[in-house]
């Protein structure tokens, strides 16, 4: 049973032994959350050895704050797949030419914010590997023209277009050029979601080339019922890090009772799995800082760098606020309406109703672009998954509670004290909704 009396009793006893000077717990210096579909240091566990070596140490990870300028370049609108959850509804056959790309790269170097350390340059599509030669040109251009810039090249790919020549080039440049694979789980699940493409992927290439690199998973209605099996499968084939484990965006009603019932069993199975294998990095569903919920005042941030640090360049060189707000997702009239929006104002992204009334607000995932797609507003959050987030919080609390009891040194004292406090409140607020 999730958060049973025995666990709660043990947590309360442990909390009573912790000495803390934090009468009002204030979480400071928290960088904006990474977007699940744009770069946002998505591959930080590959290129940062300190993070890689301390992958399950919350305190260490929180103290390391590498903030890179993270622009994204759309090098093609084309894709060779048609995934069931794709939100890009206005694709055409356009690709970026090298003249436009050169100008974009020059602009990025000239406009790098002063408070950033290096550049994480992300290529997206469509499927970016369709224009692999264009990515190689960008690499060579930056190395030749800006040899002193600390630049990382990154793309998420469906993995189906890598030939031997491409693999050979990538192996030679793997220390600066990273690919992250989209992989939704077992052959059956992946093929259902992603055009029967499982057997077209050289999975071993990704594991061997970037041993610390994980995969990106997107959940569909179909994969929800096999969530635990899919997560365990991905770990079993050698991937330690699983990111982007999120319900696909849109107005689908995720809070259906049948989805809740399915998730109960799936989340319980995953909690048991991660307790049995504590050396594994938690997948993105579970990797949450519960102590954020106890911060006073409550954290206010945009959750991503939309309009500022995650600038998106379309194939013609036009700049947009992020990888979601593009001509592939919105029509020209919608994009025009957004053109005068003040993306620098945090208040323009705060859903006051959620902020003032929901305990889980600081850890509840949201995408401003998806909010606009469904609600016509960047700040008004999509409410079709509130129940699922509350259910998930119970199982995250259960897992973190068990991990803290197993290893009391897992967290620094202040974080540990307020993590336990949040576990107590999550149980109090949400347990009766589901059990």
Image: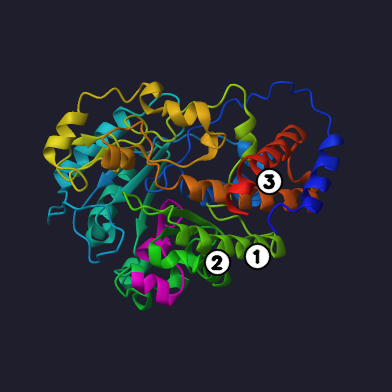
Residue 171 to residue 115: above or below: below
x and y, in percent, of residue 85 in the image: 31, 59
* Residue named by callout 1: 273
The boundaries of the magenta stretch are: 168-192
* Residue named by callout 3: 57
Residue 92 to residue 144: above or below: below
In which image quadrant can residue 308 be found?
top left
The quadrant the N terminus occupies is: bottom right
* Residue named by callout 2: 228
Label 1 near label 2: C-beta < 8 Å? yes
Decide which of tag 3 and tag 1 comes sooner along the chain: 3
x and y, in percent, of residue 325 in the image: 25, 40
As drawn, the label of residue 115 is none
Gap in Å between the C-alphas at discs 2 and 1?
9 Å
Residue pictured at 81% horizontal, 41% vertical: 12
Gap in Å between the C-alphas at discs 3 and 1?
19 Å
Residue pictured at 58% horizontal, 21% vertical: 297
Decide which of tag 2 and tag 1 comes sooner along the chain: 2
At label 3, counting other C-alpha atoms closer than 10 Å, the crowd grade (few under 14, some 14-19, many 20 or more) is: some
Label 3 near label 2: C-beta < 8 Å? no
At label 2, counting other C-alpha atoms closer than 10 Å, the crowd grade (few under 14, some 14-19, many 20 or more) is: many
- Element at label 1: helix
Decide which of tag 2 and tag 3 comes sooner along the chain: 3
Give whichever of 81, 52 is nearer the camera.
81
Residue pictured at 30% horizontal, 35% vertical: 311
Give whichever of 112, 344 is nearer the camera.
344
- Element at label 3: loop
Give whichever of 41, 26 is nearer the camera.
26
Residue 205 on the magenta segment: no
Residue 116 appearing in the image: no
């Amino acid at each position: 049973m999730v958060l049973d009396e025995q666990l709660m009793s043990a947590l309360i006893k442990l909390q009573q032994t912790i000495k803390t000077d934090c009468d009002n717990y204030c979480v400071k210096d928290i960088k904006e959350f990474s977007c699940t579909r744009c770069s946002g240091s998505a591959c930080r566990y590959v290129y940062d050895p300190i993070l890689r070596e301390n992958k399950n140490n919350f305190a260490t990870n929180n103290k390391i704050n590498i903030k890179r300028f993270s622009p994204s370049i759309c090098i093609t609108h084309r894709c060779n797949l048609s995934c069931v959850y794709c939100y890009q509804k206005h694709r055409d056959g356009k690709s970026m030419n090298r003249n436009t790309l050169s100008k974009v790269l020059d602009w990025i170097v000239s406009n790098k914010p002063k408070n950033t350390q290096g550049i994480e340059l992300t290529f997206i599509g469509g499927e970016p590997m369709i224009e692999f030669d264009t990515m190689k040109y960008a690499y060579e251009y930056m190395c030749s023209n800006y040899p002193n810039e600390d630049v990382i090249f990154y793309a998420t790919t469906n993995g189906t277009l890598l030939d031997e020549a491409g693999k050979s080039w990538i192996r030679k440049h793997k220390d600066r050029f990273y690919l992250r694979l989209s992989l939704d789980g077992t052959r059956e699940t992946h093929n259902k979601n992603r055009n029967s493409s499982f057997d077209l992927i050289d999975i071993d290439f990704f594991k061997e080339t970037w041993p610390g690199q994980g995969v990106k998973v997107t959940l569909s209605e179909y994969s929800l019922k096999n969530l635990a099996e899919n997560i365990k499968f991905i770990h079993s084939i050698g991937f330690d890090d699983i990111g982007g484990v999120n319900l696909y965006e849109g107005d689908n009603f995720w809070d259906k009772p049948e989805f809740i019932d399915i998730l109960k069993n799936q989340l319980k199975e995953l909690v048991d799995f991660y307790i049995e294998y504590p050396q594994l990095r938690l997948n993105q569903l579970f990797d949450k800082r519960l102590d954020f919920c106890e911060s006073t005042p409550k954290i206010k941030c945009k959750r991503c760098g939309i309009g500022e640090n995650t600038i998106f360049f379309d194939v013609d060189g036009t700049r947009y606020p992020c990888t979601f707000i593009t001509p592939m997702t919105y029509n020209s009239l919608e994009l025009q309406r957004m053109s005068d929006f003040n993306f620098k104002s945090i208040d323009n992204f705060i859903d006051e109703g959620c902020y003032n009334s929901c305990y889980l607000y600081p850890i509840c995932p949201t995408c401003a672009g998806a909010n606009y797609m469904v609600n016509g507003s960047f700040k008004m959050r999509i409410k079709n998954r509130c129940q699922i987030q509350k259910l998930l919080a119970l199982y995250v609390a259960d897992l973190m509670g068990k991990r803290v009891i197993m290893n009391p040194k897992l967290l620094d004292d202040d974080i540990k004290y307020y993590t336990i406090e949040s576990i107590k409140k999550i149980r109090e607020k949400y347990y009766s909704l589901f059990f």
